[in-house]
Amino acid sequence: MYQKVGKVAYKADLSNIQKLDKHLKHPHLSFPSIHVAGTNGKGSTCHILASVLQEAGYKVGLYTSPHLRDFRERIKINGKPCEKQFVVDFISLNKDFFESNQLSFFEMTVGMAFQYFKERQVDIGIIEVGLGGRLDSTNIITPLISVITSIDKDHTAILGNTLPKIAMEKAGIIKPNVPVVVGERRSLLRSRFRESAQNINASYHQVNHKLKAPVSDLSAWYQKDNLRTAVTTLKLLDTLYAFNIDENHIKKGCNKVSINTSFYGRYTKLSTHPLVIADTAHNVAGVKALMKQINKEQFDKLYIVIGMVSDKDALKVIKLLPPTAYYILTQATVSRAMPVEVLSKYFEELNRSFEVINDVKTAKKVAIEKAQEGDAVIVTGSTFVVAEIF
């Protein structure tokens, strides 16, 4: 599974998912959808969209990745994970097909989500791209609207090592005659998306980041761009497709994202004295955003519990972290986790104060014990580390 082992579980090819889709009798054709890609912000944007649509009275299927605690978090309807029995039955019914066609974890999961949404008769599906866009397993759908949030360097071994290359992979979700909403701020990348849209007669809609973002329970400053992107998409959905979404639905939905969709791990405050925050930031852009947000808080000393995965540029990430913080290095219980022995070498190189505690829960506990009432603790570095504290 990509979640556990990384790129070896990823197939940059649509042939298998197309075979599975045919085998399942094309379940994705049974519901309208919104397709969301981007390096950062796509998960938050999906959950905001789902929350507002739920407030508007729709039965909303939500497919996202990765999960925190339970695989079934990836496939939800109105915030509730799919039933265990559905997962068991789906695998049992299709086991021979999966094995004979050597389907990847991503491909099986996408097929499972689409089948679940079909059987449960959702009004709309919010579909998050797993990785990239052009060759992602979700890209067999023709959505009502395509959405691209923001672009940064991540998964460079698969998507390319320059922003324009990565942008073109994301632009692969843009479909002929399907409007696309773009949240990316940089003009060079926006122009790539605009050109891709114009080439296939897809109307291009740039998010206006000067607009005031709605109030939300997703309180981090970086969520404002995601909120604007979601609202732009929702208003377009209402205008073009007569979905009944009004300002009250938007206000309520943006304020109840976590409650409506069971969304956690993006600057989630676990306590206030000391301040304890869990955030799944794991790349340069994500950590920059996290540091900008934590600097808005009032605290004395900062403790950071951090563990990473082996395919990330750890040194670039660590250089963004404050040299005055005290670090507890840890390691999630997945094979992709960067060994603490490797991680510690980067911290030694940068002359940071740290200790090593392999177990994530123990690391968090020790950090909180060390912290005074006016201090702050952050648990971060990877989705897997954050998952182990919930």
Image (cartoon, grey):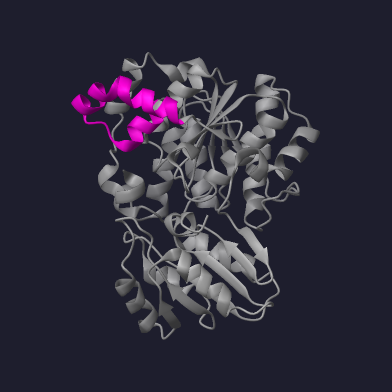
Residue positioned 28% across, 43% down in the render: 9
Residue 325, image x and y in percent?
53, 80
Vertical side of 353 occupied by 245: above or below:
above
On-image quarter of the N terminus: top left
Horizontal and vertical percent position of residue 236: 66, 30
**Does any portion of residue 135 appear in the rendered image?**
no
Quarter of the image holding residue 238? top right
Instruction: Decide which of 129, 64 is in the foreground and name it.
Output: 64
* Residue segment shown in magenta: 84-111
- For this orientation, the residue located farthest to the left is 100
Judge whether residue 11 is colored magenta.
no
Q: Residue at x 29, y 56 (%)?
A: 335
Judged by its main secondary structure, the magenta piece is: helix
In magenta segment, residue 109: yes
Whether residue 120 is visible to the viewer of this picture, yes or no, is yes
When the figure is inspected, residue 257 is found, relative to residue 237, above or below; the finding is below
In the figure, residue 45 lies in which quadrant? top right
Up-down relation of residue 350 to residue 190 (above or below) = below
User: In the depicted view, which residue is nearer to us: 67 or 186?
Assistant: 67
Residue occupying image coordinates x 47% and y 47%: 69
Task: Judge left or right: residue 220 versus residue 288.
Answer: right
> Looking at the picture, how far across and down is residue 326, in whole percent?
51, 80
Q: Would residue 250 be found to the left or right of residue 18 on screen? A: right
